[in-house]
Image (spheres, rainbow, N blue to C red):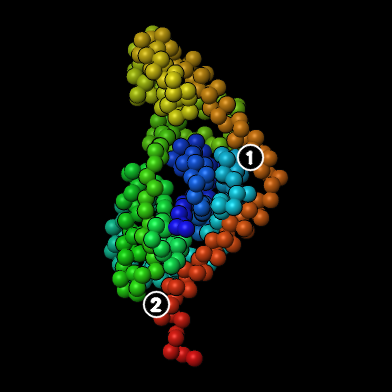
Amino acid sequence: MSVKRILTGIRPTGALHLGHYIGALKTWVELQKNYECFFLIADVQALTTHVDQPELIEESVREVLLDFIGVGLDPTRENVHFVLQSGVPELTELTTYFSMLTPFSEVERNPTVKAERSQLRSNPTAGFMIYPVSQAADILLFTPYPPKEGDQLLVPVGEDQVPHLEQTNRIAKVFNRRYGKVFLECTAKVGQVGRLVGTDGGTKMSKSLGNVISLKDNSKIVENAVKKMFTDPTKIHRRDSGHPEDCPVYLYHQSFGDPKMLGERAERCKSGDLGCVECKKDLIRTLNSFLEPIRERREKAKKAPLREYLNQGTEKAREIGKITMEAVRKAMHLNYPSIN
Ligand code: SF4
């Protein structure tokens, strides 16, 4: 039987928010129904930007676990694995070998590295600069080995993120060409991965920008956040004609509201029949009823054996990683067959 493995992950640098849900978690919940899934909590990668905040990373790993379970990821399923990156030494070893195969100029040119580097407050560390290489290791360690006809290593991404996987596959190709085939190139599992603007209408939802609604926020926090949300600046009074497509509140209705009611809402906004106060009240109700079951599952999960889930998933990742690394070392002659 062919293997179809999903590998994806998240950096634990704070509790997860609605942007994470729309951009990733929503899809992951669907994928767990049909695939073997490895959900990586990338705590080592979090060090690339938060090396001075180990307590924050520790707390965030727990929050992420609660959020995972809160949204409906189910680590009690046989095919669902929560993996702690630092618990898989094979990932570190593979990153080291891959870093020898990747020209530094290629890492420097990487558009994501360039964009994130410009936002850093201090000089980038060597670890930061090679994080696309470690990402390649995160994915390719899970290669089905030996790869068979029909096997797939899938990474869920939105259409615009497909180029991010190119570096991973470039490394796989270079390795396979130089040492013989070990790695299966990964395939983008392109889906309807959405994007959610911040509550201020900014393109990025980020805690540091103060424009997030977290999955664990209570109803009062949600209410206050929505009340402060930006709306269409040209609609000052209820009777003014609004432009819902330019309004963050409407974009949230699009993501979380009843799709059947969207057309009517847009028409009422444009005609001046709907005011922003009423529209925001509707959104508060909608978000709170969306978040309520997540809060309940999250609360219950606080009594669940989180450590055990993490250990089991990490152990499963190591099982696969050991097979891959044995093949890698053999291919690179690092098992020294000539020395007995
Ligand atoms: S009525 Fe709603 S959609 Fe229209 S501008 Fe106000 S908040 Fe936005």
- Residue plotted at (49% across, 91% down): 340
Which amino acid type corresponds to the residue marked 1 in the rendered image?
A: Arg
**Residue 332: mark in rendering:** 2
| Image location (x, y in percent) of residue 298 | 63, 39
Front residue (pair 270, 150): 150
Quarter holding residue 293? top right
Q: Farthest residue in the front direction?
A: 1
Location of residue 4 (image quadrant): bottom left
Q: Which residue is nearer to you in this view: 25 or 240?
A: 25
Q: Is residue 33 left or right of residue 108?
A: right
The residue closer to the viewer here, 96 or 163, is 163
Q: Is residue 34 above or below residue 100?
A: above
Question: Residue 89: percent from the left, percent from the top?
Answer: 53, 67
Element type where label 2 sits in the image? loop
Q: Is residue 331 visible?
A: yes
> Which residue matches tag 1?
298
* Cα distance in 3D space between marks 2 and 1: 45 Å
For the image shown, how many numbered marks are present on the structure?
2
For marks 2 and 1, the one nearer the N-term is 1
Query: Which residue is situated farthest in the bottom direction here?
Result: 340
Outermost residue toward the right in this view:
303
The mark closer to the camera, 2 or 1, is 2
Q: What is the secondary structure assignment of the residue under circle 1?
A: helix
Task: Reply above or below: 182 against 239.
Answer: below
Callout 1 crowding tier (Cα within 10 Å): few <14, some 14–19, many ≥20: many
Mark 2: which amino acid? Met
- Picture layout, residue 258 above or below residue 137: above
Residue in the image at 35% along x and 16% along y: 242
